[in-house]
Image: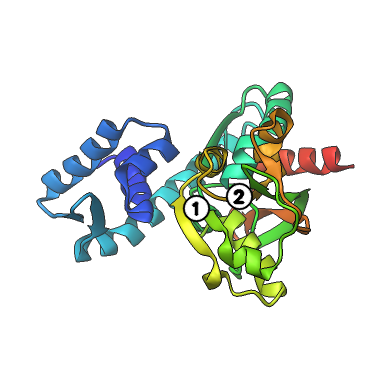
Amino acid sequence: MTLEQLKIFVAVAEREHVTRAAEALNVTQSAASGAIAALEARYAVPLFHRVGRGIQLTEAGRAFLDEARAVIGRAAHAETMLADFAGLKRGTLRIVASQTIASYWLPPKLATFHERHPQIAVELAIDNSEGAAAQVLHGIADLGFVEGTIDEPALAHWVVGYDTMVLVGREPVDAVDAAWLRRARWIVREQGSGTRSSFEAVLHARDFDPALLSVAMTLPSNEAVRTAVEAGAGVAVLSRLVVERALAAGDLAELPMDLPDRPFHALRHKERYRTRAADAFTDLIKEQAR
């Protein structure tokens, strides 16, 4: 049993999907499938039920998941403590972020961090807001960055930026009211996505039940949602960071709905060891915010 196999098992278990886990870990689908198969063959214990194209944890798999997370967390903690003895001359900064932040907001900051600390390796994982919080909670990541608020007492969270949400469609409309919201065909992100939870919070604040939306598609990424809207499949609420080029090119129209800015939050475990690399990165974000 290797640490890499455990990481792959946890990623597959959390997503119940081999391909998505492989993408998140930046490994091939065959490598992810092989790691699971090797674990099951080595101990002659099935960890997943194969149900059609889906997978679900077996009883043994559910029990093993907590142990695997604990081992990964302890290994990361041990590596971090040793690396910190060398200051910022070596080591790894492990970050997990939701899609909008990882794709658009973080990269310039990571580039600056690399210029200042070229000996620190940066590992960036992408997950929805709930998944990102889980990785920080279990010690898999040093820092998390999410769009939604996370209700987890063990995690410290603070605002590091703001994002503008916009309603977009293929063609412009004159007005958006409750009747229009019910008539429109909606393209939405999956449950647990910060983009989806932020939009649903806006609807609740306006006394509109999100269950009344006519959802045509539920898609796993911002880019997939944007592409579906560009193709005329429906309308969506997305970050302006995601759609600004399409708006400028005329591929999408911004529709008249006043949406509040949403905060980006950083996450850190309150009790786990704080690395110098993580502190240096959060200091850089504060510096750039000024």
Q: Position of residue 32 (x, y in %)?
A: 29, 37
Tell me if residue 256 comes above or below residue 154 in the rendering: above
Q: Evaluate whether residue 276 shows in this view.
A: no
Circle 1 residues within 10 Å: few <14, some 14–19, many ≥20: many
Tell me if residue 234 comes above or below residue 248 in the rendering: below
Quarter assignment of residue 51: bottom left
Q: Quick check: marks 2 and 1 in contact, CB under 8 Å?
A: yes
| Nearest to the observer: residue 273 or residue 144 | 144
Which SS class for mark 1?
helix
In the visual, does 82 lie left or right of 243? Answer: left
Tell me if residue 157 comes above or below residue 161 in the rendering: below
Q: Quadrant of the C terminus?
A: top right
Which circle marks residue 135 in the picture? 1
Q: Please, what is the three-letter code of the amino acid marked with disc 2?
A: Gly
Residue at image coords 27%, 32%? 31
Residue at image coords 62%, 23%? 119
**Residue under numbered circle 2:** 144
Residue at image coords 71%, 61%? 176
Number of numbered tags placed on the structure image: 2
Which SS class for mark 2?
strand
In the image, farthest residue toward the right: 290
Q: Earlier in the sequence, mark 2 or mark 1?
A: 1
Q: Please, what is the three-letter code of the amino acid marked with disc 1?
A: Gln
Q: Evaluate whether residue 67 shows in this view.
A: yes
Residue at image coords 44%, 40%? 24
Estimate the spatial distance between the alpha carbons at disc 2 and disc 1, rounded to whole Å.
Answer: 8 Å
Q: Position of residue 120 (x, y in %)?
A: 61, 28
Q: Quadrant of the N terminus?
A: top left
| Nearest to the observer: residue 22 or residue 187 | 187
Which circle marks residue 208 in the picture? none
